[in-house]
Image (cartoon, helix red, strand yellow):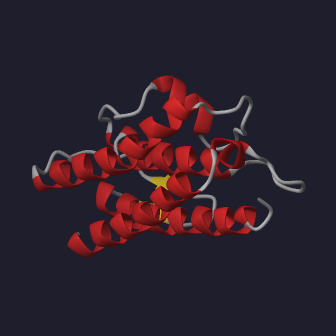
Amino acid sequence: MQSTFDITLSSRNILLKFLENYSLEQLNTIPEGYNNNLIWNIGHIVVVQQMLVYNLSGLPMMVAPEMVEQYKRGTRPEIPVTQEEVEQMKKLLYATLEQTKKDFSDEIFKEYTAFTTMSGFHIRNAQEAMEFNNYHEGVHTGIMMRISKFL
């Protein structure tokens, strides 16, 4: 699992650079031809990791239900995100990863509701969920790189 967490940490470091190097206005901008923006992609990444690993394991998530509703699959940005929300997202990028590492070490993941992703990957347990999550984060990081060319 250590390599899985190392990859996730590398991904989160890239995401943090977006949060630090783009203005609030740029983070909230939806370029023509896109359905979302930089900040929505980051919120979505945080929420999906929690849903894949914790929710499907029947465990409480570290994100508020309102955040899940705002960033789950099928949503799009409805209102601009505030600087306070950006700061909270910065914290969640790392707090969720650190807690997940601790929880794997503590072996709390006992049950799992199997799930097949839109890309056809069948996830059977929390470890596979974290492994798939790295792919998911990579996809959204690529989208963010494309969006950033329009800012």
Image coords of residue 55 (percent x, y):
39, 38
Image coords of residue 92 (percent x, y):
38, 42
Image height of 17 relative to 86, above or below: below
Residue farthest toward the bottom in the current orientation of the protein? 3
Residue 132 occupies which quadrant of the picture? bottom left
Image height of 86 relative to 122, above or below: above
Residue located 76% across and 46% down the image: 29
Residue located 74% across and 48% down the image: 36
Residue located 43% across and 26% down the image: 64
Query: How many numbered callouts?
Result: 0
Q: Residue 126 or 23: which is nearer the viewer?
A: 23
Task: Name the quadrant of the N terminus.
Answer: bottom left
Q: Residue 137 or 26: which is nearer the viewer?
A: 26
Q: Residue 38 or 138: which is nearer the viewer?
A: 38
Image coords of residue 31 (percent x, y):
83, 54
- Judged left or right of residue 2, residue 25 is right
- Judged left or right of residue 114, residue 149 is right
- Judged left or right of residue 118, residue 129 is left
Image coords of residue 12 (percent x, y):
41, 60
Residue farthest toward the right in the current orientation of the protein? 32
Residue located 21% across and 71% down the image: 2
Residue 151 occupies which quadrant of the picture? bottom right
- Judged left or right of residue 16, residue 81 is right
Image height of 31 relative to 149, above or below: above
Residue farthest toward the left in the current orientation of the protein? 106
